[in-house]
Amino acid sequence: MSTAHQGAQQTDDAGPGPSRAPFAIGLASFTSSVDRFAVSPLLVFLAVDLGVSLAQSVAVAGVYFLAYGFTQPVWGMLSDRYGRLRVMRLALVGAGLAGAASALAPGLGTLILLRGLTGMFFGGVIPTAITFIGDTVPGHHRQSALADNMAATAVGTALATAVAGVVGSTLGWRVMFALPVLLAAACLVALRPLAEPERAAGRGLWVSLARTLSHGWMLAIIALAFVEGAVVLGLLTLLAPALQDQGLDAATAGLSVAAYGAATLVASRLVKPLARRWPAHRLIALGGLGMVAGYAAVAQQVTIGTVVFAAAGLGWTWALMHTALQSWATVVLPQLRGTAVSLFAAALFAGSSVGALVAGPVASAGHWAVLFGVTAAVGGLVAVLAYALRRAYHRRHGH
């Protein structure tokens, strides 16, 4: 690595700075999370209202998630070139307009198109928020600030899944799609006082992408994010079906998995004191233990207790291990931080999709012990590899 690059990284982590991100950044992440997780609970209601089958209405969520995940590298490259706040404001304006239009959509085809546009715009918010934190919060406070941002997204996730069903059944799915529009408007107002953080001179979009993908450490982080997405997010979606396969109703299964959100919130509060005492690789190891223990428990027997334990363990992993990897992604290429973080996020979403697809046939056959046992082993390997690589990076670069 060149001396100039090392100097850039040292400057990035040195000196005074805020210990947390502005409220507006957390509010924007919260809003994006609310809109993303409000979709699934509304599918039954919009299917009935529009006179289509549930299978057809699922396309509303599918197109949204695809647009949300796979446009993130574009948003990252745009933020490197044109600025973090400028891109975030553009994303929020676009999401607000598309969200308002989707709340008025006359039919399924129009709704699918408009929800895809909404997902595309909201997909630019959280990676840009993470990049903003990387630009403005010094390295010794960064993981704590990222944990705060994660707590905001976790609250958004929990509220959306809890409120969307109630609003959909009482006021209608159109009202629920309109609520994030109001939140997006509030975000734009809250962002007005913020100044654009300093960053390196903008480069061409393809140059940024090529430089990021040619960096060895960044490739390693992207690969870790992909596998983490598969074993954490991809398999998390199968915990509730595993309980339902044992004869439990959907409501009980869903509430059991809700321990994930609660554990994420609680564990995110522990990141700040732990990050002051321990280097990032130790937090990765500690976070990985929750994932391995959780999957090992549910591999032994699928019960409400083991599923709650597994979901809580994954929340613990998400708060500790994931924020450590996320923080690492903001450090390696400070000149191309937006591109790097967005590729990290895209790899995470891609991994979650691949994990669910690979595990689907095993789950359909009811081989839960094999599925969760193998996942525990793979998760352990990922945690060990992430620990070793982060430790090697720390020894070589000093942060």
Image (tube, grey):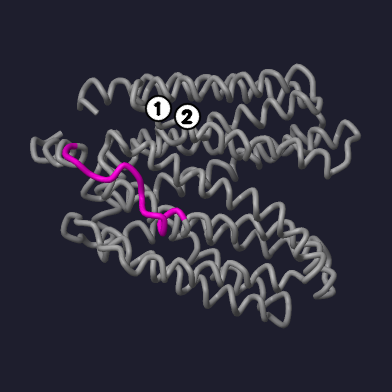
92 vs 173, left or right, is left
Name the residue carrying label 2: 270
Q: Against 327, is 199 above or below? A: below
Would you call the spot at circle 2 few (<14 residues within 10 Å), some (14-19), or many (20 or more)? some
Would you call the spot at circle 1 few (<14 residues within 10 Å), some (14-19), or many (20 or more)? few
Does 226 appear in magenta? no
In the structure shown, which secondary structural element does the residue marked by tag 2 occupy? helix
Can you tell which quarter of the image residue 188 is in?
bottom left
Q: Which residues are magenta?
A: 14-26
Q: Against 289, is 132 above or below? A: below
In the structure shown, which secondary structural element does the residue marked by tag 1 occupy? helix
* CA distance for labels 1 and 2: 6 Å
Closest to the observer, 186 or 103: 186
Q: Against 230, is 273 above or below? A: above
Quarter of the picture holding the N terminus: top left
Can you tell which quarter of the image residue 259 is in?
top right
Can you tell which quarter of the image residue 271 is in?
top left
Tell me which amino acid carries mark 2. Leu
Magenta: main secondary structure equals loop
176 vs 383, left or right, is right
Residue 258 at x, y percent in the picture? 70, 40
Residue at image coords 35%, 66%: 87
Quarter of the picture holding the C terminus: top left
Is label 1 in contact with label 2 (beta carbons under 8 Å)? yes
Residue at image coords 61%, 63%: 63
Residue at image coords 71%, 37%: 257
Name the residue carrying label 1: 273
Residue positioned most to the right:
247
Closest to the observer, 273 or 103: 273
Closest to the observer, 357 or 242: 242
236 vs 344, left or right, is right
Residue at image coords 47%, 73%: 94
